Amino acid sequence: MREVKFFPAELGLSGWLETSSYKTHKFNQTEEILDRYDYVVVGCGYGGYAAALRFAELNPAAKVAIFEAIRIGNNDSGKNAGFLIDVPHAFGSDDSTLEDKKWCVQLNVATLNKMRKIIKDHELPVDWDDCGKYLAAYEPSAYKYLDHEAKDLDDVGVPYSYVEHEELTQKLGTRYYKKALFNPGTAMVNPADVLRGMCTVLPENVHVFEDTPVLRIEDGTEPLVILTNGRRVRCKAVVVTAGPFLEEFDLSKHQFCPVISFAGLSRQLDEREMTYFKDVHPWGVTAAHSGGTTVRFTRDNRLLVRNGLKYATYFTCSPERIRRSRKMLRKAFNNRFPNHKHVNFEYVWAGMIHLTMNSKPVFGRRGNIFYSGVGEGAGVAKSFTMGTYHAEWANGIDSDVLEYLKNDKKPSWLPPSKLLTTLGAETRLIWETVTAKGEI
């Protein structure tokens, strides 16, 4: 298998990691790396965490290692908008059938319940709110997307409610949105805080290494994992939960359409500024239009906006592009919170959305290497699910869930030319931005 050329990078200053109570937690140090483990997990997002946890549950005496290229929580799993969504949430094209959507709800609910149990059992003081989410519209032309979502929720038997303008204003503290559909099953979290927090209570037989990139993986009866620091680790099986970076390991080709999005997290609002949010509980809003702005009011009294779409040809973007993202972020913020225009962004960052053209995930196996990556815009729960069942697959445990994941429809193929793919993707993203109008 070829050597990795492009590695994950810390794009901007992530407010989620910077405000996490686990920011300074020390995981295992590189001098503790063993020459042999039973299982190695490459990538410590929610999928990697779940794989390592399940390996430890199935084999309490096994030695398990997780290698994350950058700081845990500053990867894409920790830089999203913090929506742990229980229902289907595709971005753009979606090949899912009704059966797929029912599976999605079943597996997402199970995953969220498992995470809740971990947090409760270990009394982790993480930033988690079971407050549901709003799919909200500013433009009347976007109401059709609310109705489409309602039909999908009816089909899968998930409760929801419509919220009209005046009631919505009271619940959100902003008059911007005209109508919304509320789904009570979604959790709002600080994704870096929850991920790092759960990693601190992994079983003792799991060694967690951050800032430890993997350079190459060689398959065989006992795969060899080669780190950039020169260490060579043998194991029985490897799970790679690297999203679009699967291509760097030659485990995926022309399947991912990675998109960079940008986020701004405000400073904490003071007592006077909080008067506009009197009796308002933490909330999260996704835009009815897929190109629109995601917004949150957090439980530590901050406001987050996330928007801007850029195709990530090489899985990254420049500091200058992050700086320029402030203009669109600021406009969205000021439109929604005109009484808080003076409130600055304390943190601005970029994160990658691991999309495929038909919202289908990558989930596969090559010898003793197991690999996966989500294909949609709300992949935390799905990543966790796939990581869990990779560990079961590696241990020869079959189930209806594993068979479903193995036989699900594959991602649509993209042109092999990076130039053609980039031009096509950028054109599509510009169109999404233009048609979103006031949803941005």
Image: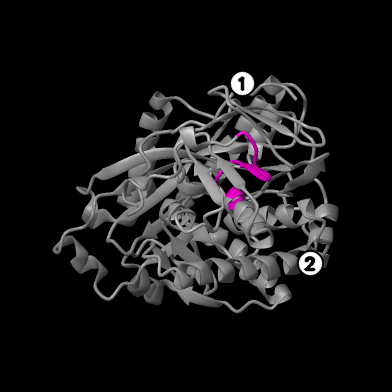
Mark 2 surroundings within 10 Å by alpha-carbon count, few (fewer than 14), some (14 through 19), many (20 or more): few
Residue identified by numbered label 1: 5
| Disc 2, SS | helix
Find numbered disc 1 in the image and state the secondary structure of the residue it sits on.
Answer: loop
Front-most of 184 and 44? Answer: 44
Q: Position of residue 109 (x, y in %)?
A: 62, 70
In which quadrant is the N terminus drawn?
top right
Query: Looking at this view, is 107 or 293 the one in front?
Result: 107
Instruction: Answer with mark 2 or mark 1, whichever residue precedes in sequence.
Output: 1
Q: Which residue is mark 2?
A: 98
**Bounds of the magenta span?**
35-48
Q: Position of residue 141 (x, y in %)?
A: 56, 58
Q: Amino acid at mark 1?
A: Lys
* Residue plotted at (59% across, 44% down): 65
The crowding category of the residue bearing disc 1, from other C-alpha atoms within 10 Å (few below 14, some 14 to 19, many at least 20), is: few
Specify whether residue 332 is in view: no
